[in-house]
Amino acid sequence: MNNLHKYFIILLIIGGLISIGYFVYLRLNSENLNSETMIIDNLTPEKNQKWVFFTDRVMGGVSSGKLEIGSEDGSKFYRMTGNVSTANNGGFIQFQADLSNISNTEEVFNGIKIKVRGNNENYQIFIRTNLTVLPWQYYSSEFYASNQWKEIKLPFNSFKRSNFYQPKNINNTDIRTLGIVAYGKDYSADLNVGLIEFY
């Protein structure tokens, strides 16, 4: 092997190492692109939203429930309870807030983080954006609420479109409303929510 071949091989090795290093750098930085958070609601006077509770009765269903504020060890939380029924083409109870006032920001976040406790059932977060104007258009992501408090991260890329013609990706700057929902089957709902934020 002459010197030219050796030099060429060395260049290939160095180039490969640089490429690997750059890939690792991009991966680490994409995961930590935004370590900041923005509180959506932590039940303080400065950071609480005007939540509206409603059920599928608005469309002829028979589900029922309520939203109240609970307190435990000096900490407040939202508590949604009720009975979800799929009768009459229904199947949900939820509480929803308009986030237009806080989502209009230049900061870009990766998803929603919630602190929840429940009754060992699955619940969902529904997001509507400026581009989902019809009632059946939304993005949803499911989470499991055990009987112990737990923080859960729901990245925006985990949210599923309700219709294929909606944009595939969610940007927090486009979010119009956020709903926390018991949905899709006959069951008793009991969900506590102590924190909601962008991360």
Image: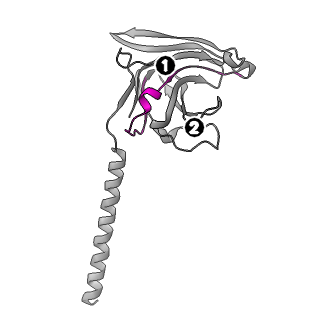
Do callouts 1 and 2 mark residues in contact (Cβ within 8 Å)?
no
**Colour scheme in use:** one colour
Q: Which residues are magenta?
A: 90-115
Label 1 SS: loop
Q: What residue appears at the point 65 percent right and 39 percent down from the top-left corner?
A: 163
Provide residue 109's location: percent of width, then percent of height: 40, 38
Residue 114 sits in which quadrant? top left
Residue 65 sits in which quadrant? top right
Residue nearer the viewer, 163 or 3: 163
Disc 1 designates what residue?
118
Left or right: where does residue 17 sit relative to residue 108?
left
Q: CA distance from mark 1 to mark 2?
A: 32 Å
Left or right: where does residue 113 sit relative to residue 56?
left
Q: Quadrant of the C terminus?
A: top left
Q: What type is the residue that disc 2 sits on?
A: Leu
Q: What residue appears at the point 34 percent right and 17 percent down from the top-left corner?
A: 46
Provide residue 76's location: percent of width, then percent of height: 38, 12
Residue 40 sits in which quadrant? top left
